Image (tube, rainbow, N blue to C red):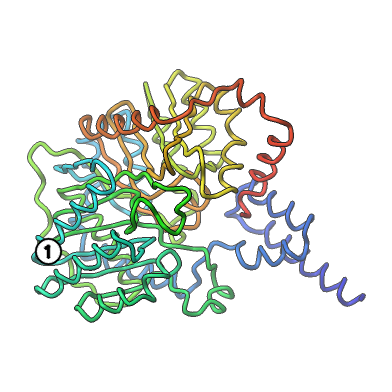
Amino acid sequence: MIFLIAGHVVIVVGFTMRILLRHDLSPPSRMAWFVVLNLLPIIGSALYFLFGEIDLGHRANKRHQQAFDALRAKTAEALGKPEAAERLINPLYRPAFHYAASINGFETVPGNGAELMQDAEASTAAILRDIDQATERVSVLAYIWLTDKTGTAIAEALMRAAQRGVVCRALADGLGSRRVVSSALWRRMEEAGVRLAVTLPLKKPVRTVLTSRLDLRNHRKITVIDGHITYCGSQNAADPEFRIKARYAPWVDVMLRFEGPVVAQNEVLFFSDWLQATNEAFEGLAPLPTPLQGGFPAQVMGDGPTERRGATPQLFATLMASAQNELYLTTPYFVPDATVLEALCAAAHRGVAVNLIFPKKNDSWVVAAASRSYYRRLLAAGCRIHEFRDGLLHAKTLTIDSRVSMVGSSNVDQRSFDLNYENNILLQDQAVTCAIRARQESYMAQSDRIDLAEVQSWSRRARVWHNIIATIGPVL
């Protein structure tokens, strides 16, 4: 018994010291781990061992760095030049574009065009049409790829393209797409000549647990056709009915179809994952897209556990700080860190009309509870909160002053901030931003407005529950 107690003390003290010595933990995250370790020492120690460190492991980090270094060396023209933002971006928003470029080197590039897809069916139809018209190469990356109607249709389009000589690459996350990578559909794709790879595979779970984390995922959604068309947004290779979580359906997404130089940046980001997964040699991108006459400036932002910590929330906060008149944000998962929470409240306090749109019914009970713990403070600051009724609002969009937009895969939660590989496109254009904002307003029309009086009427039990979950949120 004495040895068991001594061993228990050593383990808990050891993990506590590790938490105290880490420089990359925020005070709320550190406090959350202290709470768990003290209340549930054995379980807390196991949780920290499994999920406490945000690191892919030395080999994976080295391979990622080598892959990106090789890409940068061969794609300097696609990455753009720092001085472009000085010429192209309004001074009010220029700091945000410069900050985005500092994350992984994608600078502002001119001459881009974009079309907002009407809905999931329209975006799938457009993707299939573009793949069927491809003549050189097609690259598809999905976090969740299902064998449903949409997932099968995309796979079959890739097979058709491969059979007529187009170089097709399909990359799927090992956890989110685990069903498809073990399916007959995946084998058919390989037999048809589609080049396949799995990012962050689950083949060696014990080794992953010992050297990294099982829940570090590639959450990106990237499709690039012939180096001239790319799609960016929140839609997976799956039906909006999302049969694996059908009771929350439909999934409501936003997708944009881009042309112009920003396409090359998205392709570079795809290849950063492809090379890490396959160790293939990189042959370069040719030809690069020609800037569109009258197009707008834009740039890619990719983040993940191999980039610097805090990059995404700091970008969100910088964008929010640049808002002059209005700010619209949609996200299915809202568990902000202090940086983003303070930026939202500060914007509202200085008179910016801040509209936040979240799903009323969330597929994550943890996120649902944690999100509502922030409502009172946001509402008291003057933010407007809307809960979308008609399905799970899965769109990740931010619009500012009808001028600047960011769309992509990043949620406003700790998982997107710290754990997942994400991709977004940041742009300055009034027409595109107004189209996205109109879509956001359509979501608001299908939402229930939450006011401060309603939140103040919540029971003590509900408030305690929300705050408990929010307190240990960094652990969960």
Closer to us: 110 or 151: 151
Residue 185 in the image, given as x and y percentages of width and height: 30, 73
Number of disc labels: 1
Closer to us: 339 or 107: 339
Q: Secondary structure at mark 1?
A: loop
Q: In screen coordinates, is 473 left or right of 40?
A: left
Quarter containing the C terminus: bottom right
Residue, x 37% and y 73% (percent of image)? Answer: 181
Whether residue 403 is situated above or below residue 60 in the rendered picture:
above
Circle 1 crowding by C-alpha within 10 Å: few under 14, some 14–19, many from 20: few
Residue, x 18% and y 38% (percent of image)? Answer: 296
Residue 434 in the image, given as x and y percentages of width and height: 26, 29
Whether residue 380 is situated above or below residue 426 in the rendered picture:
above
* Identity, as a three-letter code, of the amino acid under mark 1: Ala
Q: Residue furthest top?
A: 351
Residue 288 in the image, given as x and y percentages of width and height: 12, 57
Q: In screen coordinates, is 7 left or right of 214?
A: right
Closer to us: 207 or 149: 149
Residue, x 15% and y 73% (percent of image)? Answer: 162
Give the quadrant of residue 48.
Answer: bottom right
Give the quadrant of residue 171.
Answer: bottom left
Give the quadrant of residue 451.
Answer: top right
Residue, x 23% and y 59% (percent of image)? Answer: 267
Whether residue 8 is situated above or below residue 90 in the rendered picture:
below
Q: In screen coordinates, is 133 left or right of 57?
A: left
Quarter containing the N terminus: bottom right
Q: Residue furthest right?
A: 2
Residue 293 in the image, given as x and y percentages of width and height: 7, 40
Q: What residue would you read off at disc 1?
A: 286
